[in-house]
Image (cartoon, rainbow, N blue to C red):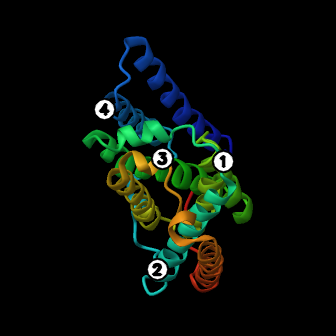
Amino acid sequence: MTYKPILAILVFLLLQALGGILLGAIGQTSPTAISQTVILTGLLSVLIIYLMGLTSGKRLFTARYIQWPLAPLALIGTLCGIIATDFVSELLNLPDLMADQFLSMARTPWGICGIAIISPIVEEIVFREAVLGHLLRQGVRPLVAILSSALAFGLIHGNPVQIPFATIVGILFAIIYYKTGSILLTSLLHIINNSIAVAQMNILGDQALDFRYTDLLGTGPFLATTLLLSLLSVTLMKRFWDKAPTPTLQA
């Protein structure tokens, strides 16, 4: 039933919204309270999705279908794509509506845990396993399933600066899931990405709000690096797509 992934997304969004409403109602808007709520609502989302039959503990982090000699292609290709997409997002100069909140959360232990570890795993379970995985197991065309899950992953962030970034990264993660049938590698990559962001916010402090790679590298090297990383990502991911066998996912 292809409507189930929509329900999974709605559950994820509804719990987040209810968490925000509850915090406002009781007057708890500290970074720690927000971080704890993000963690709690994320874990509740996973529990409900599990009860809906959209995920299974046995297959979540399975390495059964991972072709380890080919895994570096996916890992390096995706990391290059993440950096290139981050650079492109800087060029687009879209507004960041949550910069202050993320910065304050990243300074607390609960925020670090929520942003760098819990949220990546929760989002992989929701968008790669429950959404993409369910669509693939129901026989939806891979390209449609990959693009649909990636677009949903981008849009749910709701923050203009994050939407194009998350959509492209969602495509890269979806390719890995399609070829491995597992969120093992995507969770690792997601945690690395978010952990780097948290580290950057803690190292730069308030300056993180105005930090731009263009200023660090210079316009010419910045554009050349963006193009090089983009080409490298596309090349490696295409090779991974062509070389890695596609597992048959059981419904």
Nearest to the eye among marks 2 and 3: give it. Answer: 3
Three-letter amino acid code at the position of disc 3: Leu
Determine the CA span between mark 4 and mark 2. Answer: 37 Å
Comparing 118 with 104, the one in front is: 104
The residue at 43%/12% (across/down) is 25
SS at badge 3: helix
Nearest to the eye among marks 4 and 3: give it. Answer: 3
Which numbered circle lies on residue 75? none
Three-letter amino acid code at the position of disc 4: Thr
The residue at 64%/63% (across/down) is 88
Which numbered circle lies on residue 209? 3
Comparing 224 with 248, the one in front is: 224
| Residue 222 against residue 162 in the figure, above or below | below
Comparing 154 with 63, the one in front is: 154
Three-letter amino acid code at the position of disc 1: Leu
Residue at image mark 2? 71
Classify residue 243 as left or right of residue 47: right
Comparing 241 with 195, the one in front is: 195
Nearest to the eye among marks 4 and 2: give it. Answer: 4
User: Do the residues under discs 4 and 1 have CB atoms within 8 angstroms?
Assistant: no
Residue at image mark 1? 94
Nearest to the eye among marks 3 and 1: give it. Answer: 3
State how many labels appear. Answer: 4
Q: Earlier in the sequence, mark 4 or mark 2?
A: 4
The residue at 57%/56% (across/down) is 133
Q: Quadrant of residue 104?
A: top left
